[in-house]
Amino acid sequence: MQVKNKKQSKSNDGRKAVRVLWTIFGIGIACIILFFFLVAKGLFGTMPTFEELENPQTNLATEIISCDGKVLGTYYIENRSNVYYSDLSPYLPQALISVEDERFEQHSGIDSKSLFRVAFGVLTGKKRGGGSTITQQLAKNLFPRDENLSTLKLVIRKFQEWITATKLEYNYSKEEIVAMYLNTVAFGHNAFGIRSAAKTFFDKTPKELNIEEAALMAGVVNAPTRFSPVRNPENALNRRNIVLKSMEKNGFLTPEQYDSISQIPIDMSHFGVMDHNTGQATYFREYLRKELTEWAKQHTRADGKPYNIYRDGLKIYTTIDSRMQRYAEEAVREFMSKELQPLFFKHWQGHKNAPFSLNDKDKIDNIIETSMKRSDRYRELKNEGMPYDSIVAVFNTPVEMQLFSWDGPIDTVMTPMDSIRYYKWFLQSSLVSIESRTGHVKAYVGGIDFQYFKYDHVTQAQRQVGSTFKPFLYALAMQEGEYTPCTKIPNIPYNIQLENGDFWSPKNAGKHVNEEITLKYALAQSNNWISAYLMNRFGPQAVISMARRMGVESPIDPVPSICLGVCDLKLIEMVGAMSTFANQGVYIKPMFITKIEDKNGNVIQRFSPEENEAMSEVTAYKMIELMKGVVQSGTGGRLRFMYNLNNPIAGKTGTTQNQSDGYFMGITPDLTTGVWVGAEDRSVHFRSTSLGQGSHTALPIWALYMKKVYADPTLNVSKGDFPKPVAPDVDLNFDCGKEDRDYDAVEYIDVF
């Protein structure tokens, strides 16, 4: 009986022990569940809400997008733009999953096998890889850890990331998680997210990346500096090949593919850090940045706060065509670097006071001093409270600096004052090209290099426009109906009486003095006497009114000499006005933006053209016929005999006093394009008219640009003729006959 009781007692004790163990185990599980519950509820620190998971807050760059879908540049705090899974090369997810999370498709945010491997490594001291899944890393990227966490807080933070990872897996598909991860990671070199990285490293979109490029991108995210293909190319190559090996192991590559691709060197020939000084359309992007900053102040998000162009991931759809922009930049660079600037250096070589045309040293010193006071260095020193004499001393102290040259940057030691004079030697150029029928600005070049020359000669600079102003005067004459392109005027000096009783008469260059010449020939040769005749006939105020109807807004003094272009106007105004002729007399204000979207693709604002009828369709056609003569037998003739551009082109050259400014306005049925060339200081210029006139300095850039445009069949820019208006009661035959054909078909000097 005792034996039985003892056995029964032992059995009861065993059952009690089991119950205790199960109770302890149950309590432990309950505590773990409670702990996870409390973590999820935010007791140990704020957890992201469902709304935050749906709309994670990141600093998204605003993208400037061309009309042909290319990203021209970004405004950012972090250079980050989101993509969808469909925007990715198929090799990117394969490479990423292979190297970062082999069981990504099987787990639900937490990989138990990886956790056990990490735990075993910690216990044995044989650490073999991390245990975080792609989803966990995404959770950490979306909701970053605070720095300098204690061990306890780090453990709690890890649990928070696990919970966030499971929420992400519950709310998003695997494809969405991969895309979100690639949007949030840093790749180094100021590239945040895969879109920015693909552009920075390879000048491609994420969808265009090939296998070896995708493998490199997947490998770089592990340690952007250590595996940078620019700073550490050997490390990058080894890392890329590790990723390729992982892709082979996971069945994404065959052994033969791995052997072949792993031998390909890393190509960094298209590498370029994206910033506001580099890339396409730098002057345009800076102009747009100022405009958008003002726009953002007037427009609010759903939460009532103004938009921020550096954080809110806006998409700005512009009128710029990336192909035409590239051709415009190439044309400016090609002519300025290879032809005009070397000629200018040679022209002034050995001359005292070069490159200034002034003989007064005090005036030159004043120019240099004024430039000093306009510099960022001067403003910074002045804001620090430094006395003027001390600032001058700083400017006369040699320092290390990098200088612009057409052959590439020059690292040197020079005083800032000497660098100011060095930069005075460089001629500047600007170009703007507008689609005549829509007013859309297709190409915008504000200067020769934005990094070194910030001043924008398209929308900021106001320069004398010379004879390019004459079409306003001729348009007024054509509008009144009294004149046609074939109307003849005596080619003699004309005196205009001024308000003070004096008389004004311009100088003139050319032949056929004391003969009657047609208005078409007069404009073709930029005849100043005929311009004076027309000005005397209509008066300055009427001409200004015509210019206003054609979009010119800058101040113009109502004086007779405006017929020769003594007024200071912007290039954008002039080109917009000239496009009126190609658009059958309707002026359209130049457009830069078509629409703005938020980060989710919702349209915030669409932009419509501002237009008005400046003149009749017949008048516009008369002007086109008049300006064709400039190219057929006038100051724009080298388009024919030098550049073989024989399609219908209307144009006007312009050259200001002392050759300080050279212009060419060229009009075709599709495009109106204007080019300006000159130095930043008007006292810097060619000494001879033959070298400094617009037909020699600006026209060649126009020609090079248009030849590139015509050579690109994807642009569909017509070489056809201008449409003739339907006007049964008006004779639109403006072939002025034997008189014009007998005139010398040579280039004449276009200057007042």
Image (cartoon, rainbow, N blue to C red):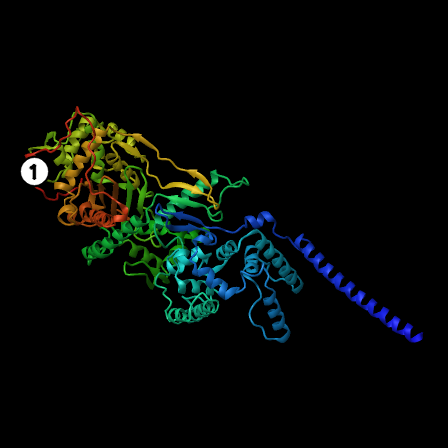
Residue 732 lies in what quarter of the image? top left
User: Is there any visible trace of residue 11 in the rendered image?
Assistant: yes
* 84 vs 8, nearest the viewer: 8
In the rendered image, the quadrant that contains the C terminus is: top left
| Residue linked to disc 1 | 741
Q: Crowdedness of circle 1 by 10 Å Cα count: few (<14), some, many (20+)?
A: few
Residue occupying the point 53% across, 53% down: 173
Q: Is residue 634 left or right of residue 291?
A: left
Q: Is residue 527 left or right of residue 214?
A: left
* 420 vs 553, nearest the viewer: 553
- Above or below — where is 742 with respect to 227? above
- Above or below — where is 535 with respect to 430? above
Q: Position of residue 602 (x, y in %)?
A: 47, 42
Residue occupying the point 62% across, 69% down: 116
User: Is there any visible trace of residue 457 in the rendered image?
Assistant: no
Q: Position of residue 249 (x, y in %)?
A: 48, 69
In the rendered image, the quadrant that contains the N terminus is: bottom right
- Above or below — where is 509 with respect to 377? above
Q: Position of residue 148 (x, y in %)?
A: 61, 62
Q: Is residue 718 left or right of residue 246?
A: left
The amino acid on which the numbered mark 1 sits, given as a three-letter code, is Arg
Residue occupying the point 83% across, 70% down: 14
